[in-house]
Amino acid sequence: MDELKMIEKVLKTFTNQFGEGSATTLTKMFAPEHARGYVPTGNLALDWVIGRPGWPLGRISEIAGPYGSGKSTILARTIGAAQKKGVVCILCDTEHSYDSTWARFHGVDPERLILLTPPHLQGVFDYAKAVITEVKRAQDDVPVLMGVDSVSAAPTAAEVESEDGTEGKQRAEHAKVISEGLRKLANLIWDQNVALVFVSQLKDNPGIMYGANKSKLGGHAIEFHAGLMVESRRTGYIKEADSKDVLGQTIQVSTIKNKFVPPFRTRTFDLFFNEGLRPNEILLDFITDEKLFNPPLIKAGGGWYEFNGSKYRRADMAAMLDEGLMEHAYKVLNLTGPYGEK
């Protein structure tokens, strides 16, 4: 018997016994009619690092980094970009740090954002399961983005219930709760086409003098389940010329685990405190990069940008770039794909 016919026969028999969708081939799983799609990040630099046009639907992803490294801003920017594409966005805010004014600042529509405030870490996963189920019951074909900011700030139920706050403080307790919760959620987000993005804090380990001295509360629990892990770090501050005033910071993002393209891609971008990201300046950095665009669409040198025989400053050149050029860059960088198509 031909091998392909044999496989088809086995799958048919298996499906009859265990139900539709219990077994298939990898090719059929990711065929166009079953394409999962992606949730846009609104950040070309981050998309290039990921290797796809956004966070993958049906998968677990993580943004990790020390304090002040732009993690919450990256997530907020994603929510704003996703809402514009019709994605239902859910935010589990364990830090109680989000504010409607700050959210609008990064493109978020607060009226269309489902905000969850669970009392403890176990509640994060209970709330997630309940709200995803309700959203899909109301409209099954809609893609969903759920962000958790952050697992590091959420206490365990034992910590909340203990009178002196000493019970359940061990990191192993957090890892146990997170691991158990993800085992329950992994199949649900795959079946319901949900992009689940966790924000995690990298913390210092006092007393360690050699090797890695950073760790995450919850250990490796998310790492085992995540298909994509992005690390964010602040590499410097942006200051106004001839002034000590800090206008923003330079953020470096890199993938340390990636099941879509080879990991360890790295890119930097600027984050301004009074306006957030500048997408056109990020685009400008790409189209002047000779390694990615050969020949580059615009020549850069000495702080000037040359286009059609004229020279421009960075801000002026960025202002001239249109949306069509952004779409062209995504195609050249092979970052095209469906947004939220199931």
Image (cartoon, rainbow, N blue to C red):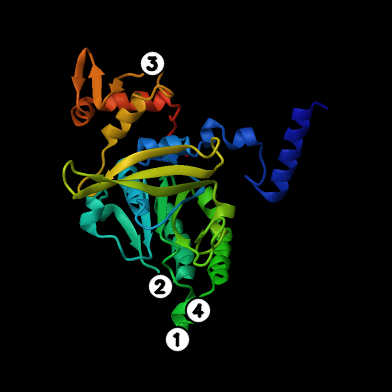
Amino acid identity at mark 1: Asp
Amino acid identity at mark 4: Ala
Image-based side of 171 in relation to 21, left or right: left
Amino acid identity at mark 3: Pro
Say whether disc 2 or disc 4 marks the residue closer to the N-terminus: 2
Q: Residue 33 placed where, x, y %? A: 52, 33
Name the residue beneath numbered marker 3: 295
Say whether disc 4 or disc 1 marks the residue closer to the N-terminus: 4
Mark 4–mark 1 distance (CA, rounded to whole Å): 11 Å
Specify few, some or many for label 2: CA neighbours under 10 Å numbering under 14, 14-19, or 20 or more: some
Point out the frontmost of discs 3 and 2: 3
Say whether disc 2 or disc 1 marks the residue closer to the N-terminus: 2
Q: Is residue 56 visible?
A: no
Rendered image: mark on residue 119: 2
Specify few, some or many for label 3: CA neighbours under 10 Å numbering under 14, 14-19, or 20 or more: few
**Badge 3 element:** loop
264 w.r.t. 104: above or below: above
Q: Residue 197 placed where, x, y %? A: 44, 52
Q: Are marks 3 and 2 in contact (CB under 8 Å)?
A: no
**Badge 4 element:** helix
Point out the frontmost of discs 4 and 1: 1
Mark 3–mark 1 distance (CA, rounded to whole Å): 64 Å
Say whether disc 3 or disc 1 marks the residue closer to the N-terminus: 1
Specify few, some or many for label 1: CA neighbours under 10 Å numbering under 14, 14-19, or 20 or more: few
Name the residue beneath numbered marker 4: 158
